Amino acid sequence: MRLRHIKGCEDFIHEADECIEEADARTYKGKWHLLFNNNKDIHIEIGMGKGLFIRRMAARYPDINFIGIEKYTSVLMKAIQRLRLERQTAEYDKTDINLCYACIDASILKDIFESGEVSKIYLNFSDPWPKARHSHRRLTDKYFLDIYSTLLETGAKVEFKTDNTALFEYSLESIKNSDFELDFYTYDLHNERRIENIMSEYEEKFSKNGQKICKLVAIRK
């Protein structure tokens, strides 16, 4: 489905304190601790959509710094608006915020983060790009897995969730040919009661419709 462009969203994002644009993000390479004013681990979500998952994660884990990455400006604008609404209705310390957004494309992540600077990567309900000629655009394609491997230190993890079985099986095969090894996978996440699960907007929608959710965890070798 084609995304609807919201007039003025680029100006909105440019003026938003909650978001880092590409030019500024490049200057933080190897120095993201300066933005957060601490040396806590950094977790990133690539393709965060409207941001529910990463907002929930940041609230649950205050000792981790989270960066939500989204390239579509109209979607990112909505994510910022929803973050502001939550902060209006909740008490929080403006000097100790552990969440920010970045308006960048995943293909330039190596220009944004230093080797080993990221401790975990989340991929939630990424675009499946179903046509074979577009497979290189899938965020679990080997092309992107190779990028992730440069950001993560040995033993760090990538967590991926989707409702698309074809994409999930493609992802399992991609991992076999990458610097990652499979740690865990399931075709029915919501029946894995032993696993903590923070849901995104899409996951809530799909699970209400009875769709099974697939998840895998891969470890950087």
Image: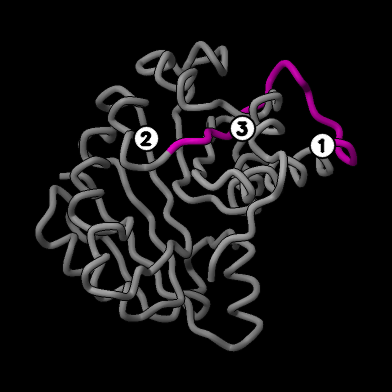
Q: Quadrant of residue 175?
A: bottom left
- Tell me, yes or no, whether the two marked residues, 1 and 3, touch with CB atoms within 8 Å: no
Which secondary structure is most common in the magenta stretch?
Answer: loop
**Left or right: where does residue 137 sit relative to residue 212?**
left
Task: Estimate the x, y position of residue 78 in percent, counting from the top left.
Answer: 71, 48
Of residues 28 and 199, the one nearer the viewer is: 28
Of callouts 3 and 2, which one flags the residue occurring earlier in the amino acid sequence? 3
Furthest-left residue in this view? 177
Q: Is 86 drawn above or below residue 108 in the view shown?
A: below
Residue annotated with mark 1: 87
> Residue 29 lies in magenta, yes or no?
no
The span picked out in magenta is 87-104
Q: Secondary structure at mark 1?
A: helix
Q: Residue at x 41, y 41 (%)?
A: 105
Residue drawn at point x = 48 percent, y = 51 percent: 47
Mark 1 is surrounded, within 10 Å at the Cα level, by few (under 14), some (14 to 19) or many (20 or more) other residues, namely few
Badge 3 marks a residue whose secondary structure is: strand
Q: Which residue is denoted by mark 3 in the rendering?
A: 99
Q: Quadrant of the C terminus?
A: top left
| Amino acid type at mark 2 | Ser
Q: Residue furthest right?
A: 89
